[in-house]
Image (cartoon, helix red, strand yellow):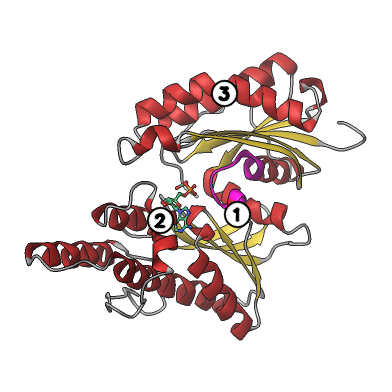
């Protein structure tokens, strides 16, 4: 506690960001330090798990110190530690988990493990202090494309998942074939602004009627075949048109399913989360569709969309408030049920 405020220290290390945050009263961010390894992994065209773990190990103590210093608090002021327990890269997760458990043990601070996707959803509570459940959440990231019915802070139903590639994964792979570099999502976002989104009609996959699941691998393969076909014929490749057409195909499906779920479940609010939630077309089209449907639209600013520890601290706070607490037997899981 400091100045009567409950302080949560959050730790996130599920992929290639080492992040530590201090959050007051669950929603007020005092610091949110994010040490990104993107430049290191760019050389390999994707995240190399072993390298990620080693860099987390090098960074974690410094990032903890920075987060405390920027928030102007001491470890003794911390009331709760929240840590990502999965899903994610196991070696990477274990570094954050070991740090969190060490602090918990040394300072006798309660610890709460957080499901990474639930952290992404909680980013919306930080971005919009007035937001309360129930609402429909759409988590779109490098590893997930999920629609969730958030009935309460700790009571959620998973309505749909991707059956193959996540939207971000498809974005990264299409960007790679277009030689745009890594990570591909932001590059597609920027390049698409210069292209014609109706230049190529890539196939949208909606699956069975009423299903909230996604499938992006067919679309991704369609784009790869289209580009390789042009290359084989020695024809010119208009990367901006392809990026714009592919991006529109991804976004149209996500928007249609998300708004459909909000309607079916009678939710008047819809919240976007995950790295791909930073995509400008997704934000714009989801907002327009929500306005048309009379649904309030929430989306965190881009820094809260990608992996960060503030969202983990927030989710941990609401778990703790509802009586969930872990102990030092807490473990990390590469795969974790929602
Ligand atoms: O949530 P996140 O930081 O990491 C996890 O997957 O957990 O999401 C990373 C994904 C990557 O696939 C990246 O290409 C994508 O988010 N991404 C974007 C944008 N910014 C990040 N995709 C499209 N448009 C963006 N502006």
Q: Earlier in the sequence, mark 2 or mark 3?
A: 3
Q: Earlier in the sequence, mark 1 or mark 2?
A: 1
Instruction: Assign a secondary structure to mark 1.
Output: helix
Mark 1 to mark 2: distance in Å? 24 Å
Nearest the eye: 251 or 153? 251
Residue 95: in sight, yes or no?
A: yes
Q: Earlier in the sequence, mark 1 or mark 3?
A: 3
Residue 165: in sight, yes or no?
A: no
Kindly identify the residue that appears in the image at 36 percent across and 77 percent down. 196
Q: Quadrant of residue 283?
A: bottom right
Instruction: Assign a secondary structure to mark 2.
Output: helix
Q: Which residues are magenta?
A: 303-312
Residue where numbered disc 3 is placed: 60
Mark 1 to mark 3: distance in Å? 24 Å
Residue where numbered disc 2 is placed: 187
Residue where numbered disc 1 is placed: 121
Q: Position of residue 203 (x, y in %)?
A: 27, 75
Task: Judge: label 2 CB < 8 Å from ligand 1.
Answer: no
Residue most extreme to the right: 3
Kindly identify the residue that appears in the image at 42 percent across and 31 percent down. 90
Q: Nearer the viewer, mark 1 or mark 2?
A: 2
Mark 2 crowdedness (10 Å alpha carbons): few <14, some 14-19, many ≥20: some
Nearest the eye: 263 or 71? 71
Mark 3 crowdedness (10 Å alpha carbons): few <14, some 14-19, many ≥20: many
Q: Are marks 1 and 2 in contact (CB under 8 Å)?
A: no
Q: Is residue 33 left or right of residue 189?
A: right
Residue most extreme to the left: 233
309 magenta-colored: yes
Q: Quadrant of residue 134?
A: bottom right
Q: Nearer the viewer, mark 1 or mark 3?
A: 3
């Amino acid at each position: 506690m400091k100045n009567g405020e409950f302080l949560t220290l959050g730790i996130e290390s599920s992929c290639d960001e080492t992040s530590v945050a201090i959050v007051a009263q669950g929603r007020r961010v005092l610091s949110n330090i994010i040490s990104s390894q993107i430049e290191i992994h760019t050389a390999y065209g994707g995240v190399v798990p072993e390298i990620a773990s080693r860099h987390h190990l090098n960074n974690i103590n410094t990032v903890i110190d920075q987060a405390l210093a920027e928030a102007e608090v001491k470890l003794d002021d911390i009331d709760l530690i929240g840590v990502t327990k999965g899903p994610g890269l196991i070696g990477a997760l274990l570094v954050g988990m070991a740090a969190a458990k060490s602090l918990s043990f040394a300072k006798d601070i309660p610890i709460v493990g957080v499901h990474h996707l639930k952290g992404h959803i909680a980013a919306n509570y930080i971005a919009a202090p007035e937001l309360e459940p129930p609402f429909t959440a759409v988590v779109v990231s490098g590893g997930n494309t999920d629609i969730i019915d958030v009935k309460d802070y700790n009571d959620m139903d998973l309505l749909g998942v991707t059956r193959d590639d996540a939207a971000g994964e498809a974005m990264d792979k299409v960007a790679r074939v277009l030689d745009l570099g890594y990570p591909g999502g932001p590059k597609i976002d920027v390049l698409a602004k210069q292209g014609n989104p109706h230049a190529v009609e890539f196939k949208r996959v909606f699956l069975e009627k009423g299903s909230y699941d996604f499938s992006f691998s067919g679309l991704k393969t369609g784009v790869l075949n289209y580009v390789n076909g042009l290359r084989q014929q020695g024809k010119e490749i208009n990367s901006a048109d392809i990026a714009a057409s592919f991006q529109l195909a991804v976004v149209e499906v996500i928007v249609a399913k998300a708004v459909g779920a909000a309607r079916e479940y009678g939710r008047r609010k819809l919240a976007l989360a995950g790295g791909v939630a930073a995509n400008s077309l997704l934000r714009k089209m989801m907002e327009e569709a929500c306005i048309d449907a009379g649904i309030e639209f929430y989306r965190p600013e881009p820094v809260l969309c990608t992996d960060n520890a503030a969202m983990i601290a927030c989710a941990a706070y609401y778990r703790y408030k509802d009586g969930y607490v872990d102990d030092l037997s807490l473990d990390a899981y590469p795969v974790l049920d929602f």
